[in-house]
Image: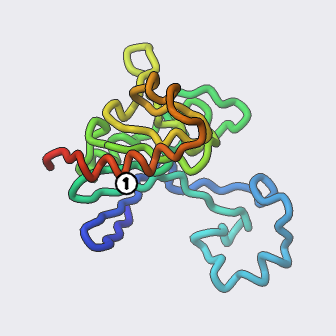
Amino acid sequence: MRQVRIGSMRIDLVSEIPSLAFEKTWLFANVTDEVIAENRSWLDHRYIEPETGRFILSHHSYLVRTPRWTAIVDTCCGNHKHRPRVPVWDNLNRPYLDNMQALGVAPEEVDFVMCTHLHVDHVGWNTRLLDGRWVPTFPNALSDGTRGVPPLRDRAQCRAETPGQPRLFRGLRAAGRRSRPR
């Protein structure tokens, strides 16, 4: 797993599916062989399989830690979810949470969940199947509430708030006043 440090901030990649090869038209309907050829200087074996020409996609989150808070950005596909339209995402059983814990963070220690958008491969681990029930994976986290999706906790307060107000930024400001010992 890769890591980046920016001052006191640490950013780690949490892998769900490290490498998934797919035909270019599955995700990039307008990409031509000419466009690929023009960009081969950087589209190397990390992005295109040399043998098949298929694109390579990684499914991962970013775990962002500061001395005051921990956030997860995009929560991949998630396990045990019925997604027959994309067979490679259907009923996954991946060690995502083990990968996160190997980085030293348990789901209960995540303060914020940020989803860049609401595609199924970006919100899957927001919930997990536990004892036959779907429960929040990050029970102590605030969600960014992207496009009207309520936060993972305090849903009543969310409904009372002005629609469209950026919950993420309010939450980050609040984190400056709240800190959990590490």
Residue ID at (65%, 56%): 21
Structural crowding at the residue carrying mark 1, measured as other residues with C-alpha within 10 Å and reported as few (<14), some (14–19) or many (≥20)? many
Direction left: furthest residue: 181
| Residue 79 visible in the picture | no
Up/down of 123 relative to 26, above or below: above
Q: In the image shown, does 14 or 55 lie closer to the viewer?
A: 14
- Check the image and report above or below for 160 versus 106: above
Q: Quadrant of the N terminus?
A: bottom left
The colour scheme used to paint the residues is: rainbow
Q: Given the image, on which type of amino acid does mark 1 rest?
A: Leu
In this rendered view, identify the residue nearer to me: 25 or 69: 69
Q: Is residue 99 above or below residue 90?
A: below
Relative side of 26 to 41, left or right: right
List x then y, in percent, for residue 140. Answer: 31, 33
Q: Left or right? Give the position of 109 relative to 71.
A: left
Please tell me in which quadrant of the rendered image residue 153 appears.
Answer: top left
Residue depicted at 44% across the width and 51% down the height: 169
For the point 27% across and 73% down, which residue is it? 7
Tag 1's secondary structure?
Answer: strand
Q: Position of residue 122 (x, y in %)?
A: 56, 45
Judge from the rendering whether residue 36 lies leftward or rightward of residue 97; answer left or right. right
Q: How many marks?
A: 1
Q: Position of residue 29 (x, y in %)?
A: 84, 58
Asked whether the viewer can see residue 115, the reply is: yes
- Which residue does the numbered mark 1 point to in the structure image? 63
Residue 146 vs residue 64, the one in the foreground:
146
Q: Residue at x 62, y 77 (%)?
A: 44
